[in-house]
Amino acid sequence: MHNKRNEEPLVEVRNLCKYFRQGRSVLKAVDDVSFTIYRGETLGLVGESGCGKTTCGRTILKLYSATSGQVLYKGQDITNSMSARELLAFKRSAQIIFQDPYSSLDPRMTIGEIIAEGMDVHFRYTPAEKQQKVRELLAKVGLTEDYANRFAHELSGGQRQRIGIARALAVEPEFIVCDEPISALDVSIQAQIVNLLIQLQAERGLTYLFISHDLSMVKHISDRVGVMYLGSLVEVAPSKAIFAHPLHPYTQALLSAIPVADPDFEATRVRVKLEGEVPSPINPPSGCKFRTRCPHAIKVCAEQQPPLVEAEPEHFVACHCWQHLYGDGRK
Ligand code: SF4
């Protein structure tokens, strides 16, 4: 896949936890997660619904306060209290594109007002400069300037998501959390939006955390991929490596469900079927959280949570058995 990142960390997530109290119980949505996002790259974050990937993205952006752990942004710990000025600078630099373009745009505002809203907070443009910026942003996301006077309900889903992207770009961010940005769109439109994100990244040097349950799209856009299960990160690797030889049984099961365009391969490949439902994050299994659905579980899996270890350069996996499962014969 792409290999455009340099080695400068932009976001460092260290032992991040985000718990929600539910009555007398505690829901561990994000449970001791650590990873780095390098400047200029796209890190895909995947997993089934409820695995904590969206909560993780929102906690990184301070939309939720972390329960414990750290998030460093450009080396600064943003989980600690920040001055109003530092917080404003962070909010400008780190933006989000929401999953649902239908509900994330204010129906009472014109598209021009929606795009310009963030500019009023962060820049001191004259009205004429603002209008010019709105026109430039509309053109950048593939829409004509007359869209500035329309309302969200007049637009298609794909057009609304283009507005969501223009709104994020309006404050000239460096980092964008793309939170399931295509899952509410028709399949025919999804690739257009992903290609637009790729193009904008190339032009502006943006860094993305691309959250999705759609592995085929993650493969298309990501330099590296992290896989989450029940609040934990179970595998992180360069995109090419994780799709060519996933090491975690959960990643293998997710990948084996993706249709492949090669009929010969499709006819012969072995599908790994996941048994059972995802357990509740309020009361997760002991040891490895995946053990109740894992075809390879052994005694130690119920006793100890496997640490995330570097199985090969840049390829991390949290499984007691990865060496036993793959040995030296793995290609
Ligand atoms: Fe399966 Fe055990 Fe590995 Fe967990 S640690 S994925 S249960 S083999």
Image (spheres, grey):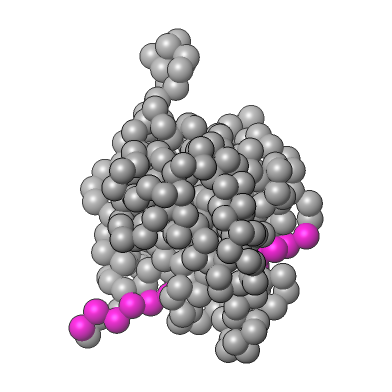
Q: Is residue 15 magenta?
A: yes
Residue 150 % position (x, y): 38, 47
Decide: is 66 above or below 128: below
Residue under the image location 79 percent in, 55 percent down:
7
* Residue closest to the eye, 51 or 322: 51
Q: Is residue 257 left or right of residue 86?
A: left
Residue 56 % position (x, y): 47, 65
Residue under the image location 61 percent in, 46 percent down:
136
Magenta range: 8-23
Decide: is 159 above or below 133: above
* Residue closest to the eye, 64 or 188: 188
Q: Is residue 189 visible?
A: yes
* Residue closest to the eye, 101 or 226: 101
Q: How many marks?
A: 0
Image quadrant where one finds the C terminus: top right
Q: Residue furthest right?
A: 7
* Residue closest to the eye, 133 or 237: 133
Residue 35 % position (x, y): 61, 62
Q: Residue furthest top?
A: 264
Q: Residue furthest left?
A: 23
Q: Main secondary structure of the magenta part?
A: strand
Residue under the image location 34 percent in, 50 percent down:
152
Image quadrant where one finds the N terminus: top right
Q: Looking at the rendering, which quadrant does residue 140 occupy?
A: top right
Q: Is residue 37 visible?
A: no
Q: Is residue 68 magenta?
A: no
